[in-house]
Amino acid sequence: MKALPFLCCLARPSALLRATVVELAILVGHLLLYPTGIHQEQPRALPGTPAGPGPEDETDGAYGTDVTDDGTGTAADAFPAARTALLPTEGRARPPVLLLHGFIDNRSVFVLLRRSLLRHGWRHVEALNYSPLTCDLRKAAELLGRHVEQVCERTGHSRVDLVGHSLGGLIARYYAQRLGGDLRVRTLVTLGTPHGGTRVAPLMSAHPLVRQMRPHSDVIVELARPAPNCRTHFVCFWSDLDQLMVPVETARIDHRDLITRSVRVSGVGHLALPVNGAVAAGIREALGAEEDAEGSVSATSVA
């Protein structure tokens, strides 16, 4: 029995090595897929209805690839008007799911998760892009709100569910918590999101978005402020081997006013969270389950 602590010490470096190898493999695969997700996804239309943009809608907007955050445009300019007919009410019991990627990434990271949701009965799943030139998380959150309004108009749903990986989860949380987005967002699932700020890679702090993800940044401080009556339910997946979350517990939400649930994931790295099968099953469960009474906080784990 005395040997067990020693064996446990050996097990963790072994798990870390395995997770690192998997992370590298996922990184290579994602680099190959990255070009497929550069352009913004076109909205789904009814049969026989043109889904493409009109002559005046040739840019993808701030949730695409062609808008810079230089302060010269408005949020309305960034999104083309919805040009598709109202979608049928299939899957009306489940709101649309919008997927939002992390820093210097695009919607291709959600290929497997999106497929998993569609195979298990979700009828409307969209993966969004925000511009890699975006330099302010608040601006990205405002533009996310514009896109959510468009999705609600197109689908006939009054609320949506959001899944955000890393920075994407922080953008979505800011929208729901600080911009009144809780009226539209039923459930927000975050994957490896630095809710308390992360201390990783100090040399990258030259980028404004990275600075906003640091502990005690203006954004992190703002999210810690009171948020009474916020209706959104938050489900946070955090991993004990997430190399980009320092400390790893920063991917949990610790806020007295928010309805939160933390899901601990074992042996999974940061890049693997959106593609891991057990995590996908947990996300489906979180989106499909009836929420508990407001204010309840619980913790679960994923092996």
Image (cartoon, rainbow, N blue to C red):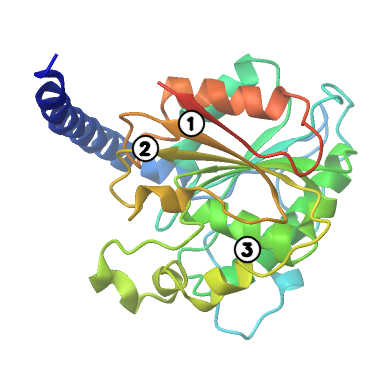
CA neighbours of label 2 inside 10 A, class few (<14), some (14 to 19), many (20+): some
Which mark lies nearer to you, 2 or 1? 1
Q: Nearer the viewer, residue 216 or 103?
A: 216
Which residue is rendered at x = 62% and y = 62% of the image? Answer: 59
Q: Label 2 is placed on what type of residue?
A: Leu
Marked residue nearer the N-terminal end (1 or 3): 3
Residue 19 screen position, x and y as percent = 23, 32
Q: Inspect this view and state whether residue 79 appears.
A: no
Q: Quadrant of the N terminus?
A: top left
Label 2: which residue?
Answer: 33
Where is 25 relative to 223, above or below? Answer: above
Which residue is rendered at x = 32% and y = 78% of the image? Answer: 206
Label 2, label 3: how many angstroms apart (C-alpha)? 22 Å
Marked residue nearer the N-terminal end (2 or 1): 2
Which mark lies nearer to you, 1 or 3? 1
Which residue extends farthest bottom? Answer: 72
Where is 51 relative to 92, above or below? Answer: below
Q: Label 1 is placed on what type of residue?
A: Val
Label 3: which residue?
Answer: 61
Asked whether, in this view, residue 238 is left or right of residue 53, the answer is left
CA neighbours of label 3 inside 10 A, class few (<14), some (14 to 19), many (20+): many
Q: Label 3 is placed on what type of residue?
A: Gly
Label 2, label 1: how many angstroms apart (C-alpha)? 9 Å
- Check residue 99 in the rendering and tell me which mark sits there, or answer none: none
Q: Nearer the viewer, residue 250 or 147?
A: 250
Label 1, label 3: how many angstroms apart (C-alpha)? 22 Å
Q: Secondary structure at mark 1?
A: helix
- Check residue 111 in the rendering and tell me which mark sits there, or answer none: 1
Q: Secondary structure at mark 3?
A: loop
Do tag 2 and tag 1 residues touch (Cβ < 8 Å)? yes
Q: Quadrant of the C terminus?
A: top left
